[in-house]
Amino acid sequence: TDLNAFIDGLPKAELHLHIEGSLEPELMFALAERNKVAIPFDSVEAVRAAYDFSNLQDFLDIYYAGANVLLTRQDFEDLAFAYFQRAAADNVRHAEIFFDPQTHTDRGVPFGVVVEGLIAGMDRAKAELGVTSGLILSFLRHLSEDEAFATLEMARPYLHHFVGVGLDSSEVGHPPSKFQRVFAAAQAMGLKLCAHAGEEGPPEYVWEALDLLHIDRMDHGNRSMEDPALVRRIVAEGMTLTVCPLSNHKLCVVDDLKDHPVPEMLRQGIRVTLNSDDPAYFGGYVNENYRQLAAAVGLTREQLTLMARNSFAGSFLDDAAKAERI
Ligand code: ADE
Ligand code: ZN
């Protein structure tokens, strides 16, 4: 349709993408073969059939298992470059991508192998596709704050490669307050701060992400809409939310895409961006998120343009770089 062509043509930044969540079943099989790693599936079709989730934890169990095929620097480079090729096809000009170092270091893959591989893929994306990017080190919130601190120590020699830190994995039972000290340490190291908040967790967790972690950007944020005072705070701060419609639907954060909170978020003046989260698991890259949401809730060209502009404005690019791109 015309609207889909319009979406395809919008230049955009992607701000909420877990690189491990861009591992397509085809590449999973290829890496399993290359590395002689066993995977509990017979075929690509069997993998896709297993991607039927009733909540976040259901997904995380299969997502961490999938990451077992990633072992070498080349694997991480191939993973990253494959994402950037798909992103470039969606007219993504800049991406700030999460990775979960603990998922790999806890399996014995050295921190440097992960980072050097991802950076190689990012450098190739810049050179061959013209897509710029930044890397965000995300702490697994189901692990301890001490383990997060140990990860931050591993990151020190590679600090210049990171734009920020994030907080992901199982939300309920692991509030932001658990990571207050390590976020303060990351900020003191010059890193920007993001956290997943209000995906499954209550509005109280979103308040904590703002008041205790002092985040610069909020990932998801859906359940903020339950608390009018919290919405006022988010609007007053000009906080950017990285919203992920297909993820929300697949993980049953929303039962029906027609009931997605993005239109209400926009009405209230929240700086919303649209993102793919874990596109290999949730059925589409960033343009598919724009398309399916627009079809379900009826977004205007003005709203779509605003969210694409928000994605550059809410990025961690410096002001001069933003001014060039918006
Ligand atoms: N890790 C990868 N995707 C995630 C999500 N949507 N929520 C929490 N942790 C994640
Ligand atoms: Zn996420």
Image: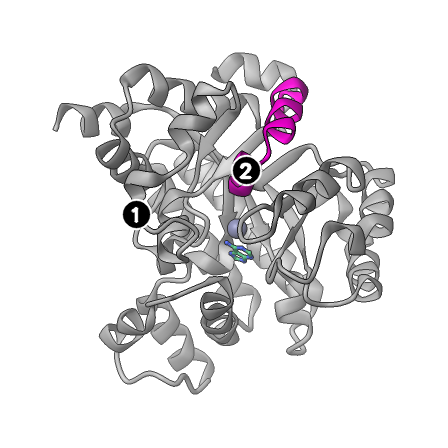
Q: Which mark is residue 226?
A: 2
Seen in the image, is 310 located left or right of residue 258?
right
Q: Is residue 254 above or below residue 297?
A: below
Q: CA distance from mark 2 to mark 1?
A: 18 Å
Q: Is residue 290 above or below residue 61?
A: above
Q: Amino acid at mark 2?
A: Glu
| Secondary structure found at label 2 | helix
The one nearer the camera, 134 or 203, is: 203
Residue 74 locus on image (x, y percent): 51, 64
Seen in the image, is 2 located left or right of residue 250?
left
Specify the quadrant of the image occupied by residue 106. bottom right
* Residue visible at 63% across and 43% down in the picture: 203
The one nearer the camera, 130 or 318, is: 318
In front: label 2 or label 1? 2
Q: Amino acid at mark 1?
A: Asp
Most prominent secondary structure in the magenta stretch? helix
Residue topped by disc 1: 256
Residue 27 locus on image (x, y percent): 36, 67
Q: Within the magenta stretch, is there residue 227?
A: yes
Seen in the image, is 241 located left or right of residue 150?
left
Seen in the image, is 172 located left or right of residue 149?
left
Residue 158 locus on image (x, y percent): 75, 51
- Magenta span of residues: 222-239
The one nearer the camera, 189 or 126, is: 189
Q: Is residue 233 visible?
A: yes
* Residue visible at 35% across and 48% down in the picture: 246
Q: Are marks 2 and 1 in contact (CB under 8 Å)?
A: no
